Amino acid sequence: MAALDGARVVLGVTGGIAAYKAVEVSRRLVDAGAHVIPVLTEGAEHFVGRTTFDALASEKVQTSLWDEQSPIPHTLLGQSADLIVVAPATARLLSDYRTGRSADLLTTTLIATAAPVLLAPAMHTEMWEHPAVQENLDVLASRGVHIVPAEPGRLAGGDIGFGRLAAPRTIVAHAERVLAGGDLLDRHVVVTAGGTSEPIDAVRVISNRSTGKQGYALAEAAWARGANVTLISTVDREAPVGVTVVPVETAADMQRAVMAVDDADVIIMAAAVADFRPKDPAAVKIKKDGDAVPEIELEKTHDFLVDLGNNKPTGQVLVGFAAETDNLIDNAKGKLARKKLDLIVANDVSAPDVGFAHDTNQVTILISDGSQIEVPLNSKRVIADAIFDAVVRVQTTLP
């Protein structure tokens, strides 16, 4: 989460039962590289202790306009913040912030800042649905305040309904999106992920070692940078925040899903699509018959990336992947030209800690103008952002 790395984030916590989840929000922000300054209201201290935040955040908790080291803590907090996150944001906080009522250190800091603000409301369903609360949310959003909508789920007292605080991973993902700069804002990015499975019979398949980790990292990075993201995936993984997942299994399934998208600004074919499949898969399980071994006749799958290249609309960026074990650059250059791609991401999957199943990758990005970018071994999320840096660069040169 590059946008959060080094960012100064004021984490406001108000007095709701969901305040305990703010501890996880703090931890995730710190893990993403943010410098977290917790500000707790008097009500928040009824639900969570200062000691927990003192231990997990980057600075000690601040609670009051009067007992802190600085005579003007709200001004210093507001001026030094890159982002203010309030989780949970109670109905009272929403009302105070909307009307400009400086009731405590947190609301005073909100009023005293020019930094972006992200609110994650949480309250009981009847409160969430009250017209005054919804009006306050609408007014704040119209002023440029970012809102992480409350979710349905189990509430305090055992009720089920809307008003539940968004998951900490969702709040932190929104925080990154706010800070990322939006260089893919409102672009439709399509990413494929995972390895396709081609049936041999009713229970067996031919597949490959792809786990989809790089594709999911790409989808996560694209959404953080403002894109609307469609992830066409063969793997059962938790969907990145904000991303629409289309599940598929075979190469033909993936082809149909990709070709059904007619408004993509960027297509990234990160999936390991099978080159071959059994020609006549059996409808039932093939049984053992003594020492006999069944013969499986293979046929080529259709390389629909060639179709995408031949029919690429004006302004679209098309990205391929080349997972190789030898002649990395030559093989990638051949695919780049043959498939009429704008860029191709080449990686040597025989190298240590690179490619399938690893959390890390090392790639060379080859661009159709003849340039190339070496990205050293790093997390797949860092690799994803490097790929999108190249995509944005290519976009600026397209008609």
Image (cartoon, helix red, strand yellow):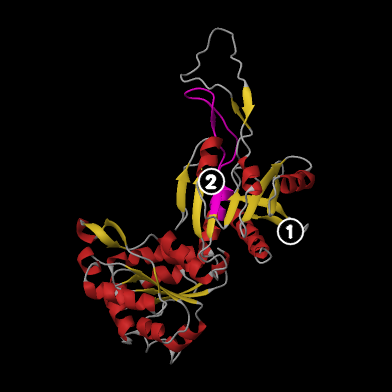
Q: Residue lying farthest top? A: 290
Q: Position of residue 261 (x, y in %)?
A: 51, 50
| Residue shown at 74% from the left, 58% from the top | 373
Q: Indicate whether 336 appears above or below 48.
A: above
| Nearer to me, 148 or 1 | 148
Q: Is residue 69 visible?
A: no
Whether pointer 1 and pointer 2 mark residues with C-beta atoms closer than 8 Å, the reply is: no
Mark 2 residue element:
helix
Q: Quadrant of the N terminus?
A: bottom right
Looking at the rendered image, the disc whose residue lies closer to the viewer, 1 or 2, is 2
Amino acid bearing label 1: Ile
Q: Is residue 125 visible?
A: yes
In which quadrant of the rendered view does residue 277 lie?
top right
Q: Quadrant of the C terminus?
A: bottom right
Mark 1 residue element:
strand
Q: Indicate whether 386 appears above or below 182.
A: above
| Residue shown at 77% from the left, 40% from the top | 326
Q: Residues within 10 Å of mark 1 (few under 14, many from 20)?
A: some
Find the magenta span and give its range. Answer: 190-218
Residue at mark 1 = 373
Marks 1 and 2, how far apart at CA = 27 Å
112 on left or right of 80: left
Q: Position of residue 60 (x, y in %)?
A: 45, 76
| Nearer to me, 398 or 237 | 398
Residue at mark 2 = 258
| Nearer to me, 48 or 331 | 331
| Residue shown at 54% from the left, 64% from the top | 225
Q: Residue 204 magenta-drawn?
A: yes
Amino acid bearing label 2: Val
Q: Indicate whether 317 appears above or below 81.
A: above
Q: Indicate whether 276 appears above or below 267.
A: above
